Amino acid sequence: MLNNIPGRQFNLNVSHWFNTEKEHQISDFEGKVVVIYVFQMLCPGCISHGLPLAKNIQQSFRADDVQVIGLHSVFEHHDVMTPKALQAFIHEYRLTFPVAVDKPSQHSHLPETMKAYQFGGTPTILVIDQHGRLRLNHFGTINELQLGAIIGSLLEENEPLQRNENNSIEDTSQSGCDENGCSI
C-alpha cells in the first residue's frame, strides 16, 4: 500500500500560502508525518470525502506527530478558482491547517506539483514520512481506517537514516531478524 521511494524527497512548488505566517517547505516538518490533501474547490469528491477526512486527521493526531497541509491544485475551471475565491472557501469551510496554491504551469493546464508527482486528479492524499520521503500518493477516496493505519505505521517506524556525501538520505537499516520480524 505504501508507495515507498527511498531517498526521494518531496517538495512543493507553490505560488501562495493561506493560514500560515510563512512559506513552508516539507523540510520544515522533519520529524512529523505530513499528510497533504490535494483538492479543488469545485471537486465534488473533495468536498464530500476529502475535506472531512483532512479535518478528521488534523483532529485525531497530535500536532507534534502529524501535520496536515492542503494543496489547491487547479487543473480545470481556472478562471473561477482564484486565490480570492480560495480564501473565502477556506473561511467558509473553517479550514485551520496551512493551505498552499499549487503553482500554475506556463506550459500546461496541470499545475507544477501535480505534474511533477503525477497526481491522478483530485482528491489525492499524499503521505510524507518523518524524513520528507513520499510514501503514499493515492487518488480518489480512501478508507479512513486504512489511512489511519498507514499514518500510525509511519509514526511507529524508527529507521536509522544517514546522509551521504551528496546530501541524499541513505537507508542504513540492516537485514535480519528481531522481535518485530525479518527484514530483507
Image (cartoon, rainbow, N blue to C red):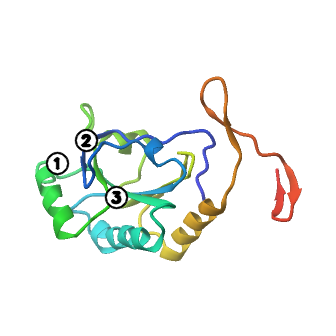
Q: Which mark is residue 109?
A: 2
Residue at 12% of width from left, 56% of height from top? Answer: 85
- Which type of secondary structure does the marked residue at label 1 adopt? loop
Give whichever of discs 3 and 2 has the lower sequence position: 2
In the rendered image, is residue 58 in sight? yes
Residue contact at pointers 1 and 3, CB within 8 angstroms: no
The N terminus sits in image quarter: bottom right
- Residue 72: give x, y in percent of width and height: 28, 53
Question: Residue beneath label 3, please?
Answer: 122
Figure quadrant of residue 173: top right
Residue at 82% of width from left, 50% of height from top? Answer: 184
Instruction: Identify which amino acid the numbered label 2 is placed on.
Output: His
Q: Choose between 11 and 22: the one closer to the eye.
A: 22
Between the C-alphas of marks 1 and 3, the distance is 14 Å
Residue at 26% of width from left, 58% of height from top? Answer: 40
Question: Residue beneath label 1, please?
Answer: 78
Tell me: residue 43, above or below residue 110.
Answer: below
